[in-house]
Image: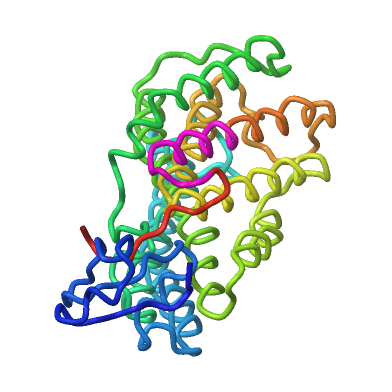
Amino acid sequence: MTDWPVTATDSEAPAVPVEEQSLRGSDGLVVTPLPYHRLAHQAARTAQWWRPFATLGVSLGLYIASLIPLVTVAVVYAVLGMSLPGLPGPSEDLADPLNPFDWVFTLGLLALMIPAVILGTRWGGGRRGSVHSVVGRFRWGLLGRAAVSIVPIYAVMVLGLALVDPPDDFVVPTFTPSLVLCYVLILVLAPLQCAAEEYAFRGLPQQMLGTWLKSPVWGIVLPVPIFVLGHGYDWAGQISVGAFALSAGFLVWKSGGLELPILIHTANNLFIFLVAPFSRSSLEQGEVDPTYLLIDIPFMLGVTALLTWWVSRREGVGLFEPVPGSGDRV
């Protein structure tokens, strides 16, 4: 498959291979389906060398701008929380699983990356919707069908480990309105936090680097160290984080979008967060038992292989072929 689009008017359409004539851009021209990381090459104007810099600059600018009101409100609230009895303020390390403020601030801070990346790729990259997937939109149906199998698998894995090897400070929390609020915030914000990290650390780098480089390997591998450095684990924990990042990056390329990586990221984090109120130390990042890798790595590879087989069969592509598209809404 060529990496450059073939365009034609309706009168010239027969010159385009039959398998490529089913995809039409918003302007009515026949386009060659491309893998996710090369969608910028559907048009010469979006494949210009400076587009990735513009995309990154606009995305970063929008994210920083969105942080200003959030941080301002958080500071004001923290001051009030320290002065008014009964009004919960932030914990010292913002990692108390029984503190609603900590959940809002830490997860909300990351969730703001979603609109920043979406608008950055549109205003800076000149592309609308392609950061979601090769069909130019978020494929809720794909995510929903995969979730039927993936969510129970992660529930058994995460909850099973918590029951088999509970943390030393495991204790059933007291039922309070604050605890209920924490769980509501987890259910609402955890998916947004996970989606934000996939947009920022998988989707954005793959399409930026794919503008310049033909191989998807660059977009899958190069962002991994940045994602790993965003976590405070020891070497064993960082290997686990790196393995997840590689698997998620591969699934973005393979499935042609961010839905499946968002699913496995959310399934993993959601159940970890739901268990967190039973252990105040559960959200602390530090030393990880190296034997954990003997479970985590095979599990991650197994989930990745399962989703690879499933999406290949669903979309009718080879096992090591990506799902292509035009990046246009269909």
The stretch of residues the image draws in magenta is 304-318
- At 36% from the left edge and 76% from the top edge, which residue is drawn? 42
Along the line of sight, which residue is nearer the eye, 45 or 21? Answer: 21
Along the line of sight, which residue is nearer the eye, 212 or 199? Answer: 212
In this rendering, would 329 be left or right of 320? Answer: left
- At 36% from the left edge and 23% from the top edge, which residue is drawn? 180
On the image, the x and y values in percent for residue 233 come to 75, 44
Along the line of sight, which residue is nearer the eye, 242 or 189? Answer: 242
On the image, the x and y values in percent for residue 17 come to 33, 68
- At 34% from the left edge and 82% from the top edge, which residue is drawn? 43
On the image, the x and y values in percent for residue 230 come to 65, 56
- At 45% from the left edge and 58% from the top edge, which residue is drawn? 199
Majority secondary structure in the magenta region: helix
Along the line of sight, which residue is nearer the eye, 158 or 40? Answer: 40
Q: Identify the image quadrant of residue 256.
A: bottom left
Q: Is residue 4 above or below residue 310?
A: below
